Image (tube, rainbow, N blue to C red):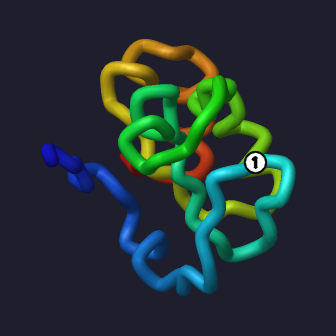
Amino acid sequence: MGAKTDGLRAEFFDKEIIDFSIDSRTVREGELFFALSQPDYERAGFNGTFADAHNFIAQAFAGGAIAAVARRERVAGDKEMQALGASNGPGP
């Protein structure tokens, strides 16, 4: 899967994930947000066309998400994601 956790501050691991969400509009405090894209929805058996949730990661954090699971290639180099990482995740 290639998940990376290097550079995360220790206090990040003290947080408890209470639930998860795939909809940034319904994220609550303490939830893990899964940023799904159209191929992810199709693989999961959803019918229809869905917005790419990578575009709503900041909204999920604003709603209380403590972390987000995202495709590295969708967020790499994104200035907004770098700013979120500086305040929510990776440390010095």
Q: Residue at x 47, y 84 (%)?
A: 14
Q: Residue at x 46, y 47 (%)?
A: 45
The residue lying toward the viewer, choosing from 75 and 13, is 75
Q: Is residue 77 above or below residue 25?
A: above
Question: How far from the left and from the top, in percent, is residue 57?
Answer: 65, 38
Q: Is residue 51 above or below residue 4?
A: above
Question: How far from the left and from the top, in percent, is residue 63?
Answer: 83, 56
| Residue assigned mark 1 | 24
Q: Which element type, helix, strand or loop, lies under badge 1?
A: helix
The residue lying toward the viewer, choosing from 13 and 17, is 17
Q: Is residue 70 visible?
A: yes
Q: Is residue 77 above or below residue 81?
A: above
Question: How far from the left and from the top, in percent, is residue 83?
Answer: 60, 30
86 relative to 2 in the view: left or right: right
The residue lying toward the viewer, choosing from 26 and 59, is 26
Q: Residue at x 85, y 49 (%)?
A: 25
Q: Is residue 83 visible?
A: no
Q: As shown in the figure, which amino acid type bears the numbered disc 1?
A: Ser
24 relative to 3 in the view: left or right: right
Q: Residue at x 41, y 28 (%)?
A: 39
Task: Indicate the quadrant where residue 72 lies.
Answer: top left
The residue lying toward the viewer, choosing from 92 and 49, is 49
Question: How far from the left and from the top, in percent, is residue 56?
Answer: 71, 33
Task: Indicate the quadrant where residue 20 lies.
Answer: bottom right
26 relative to 71 in the view: left or right: right
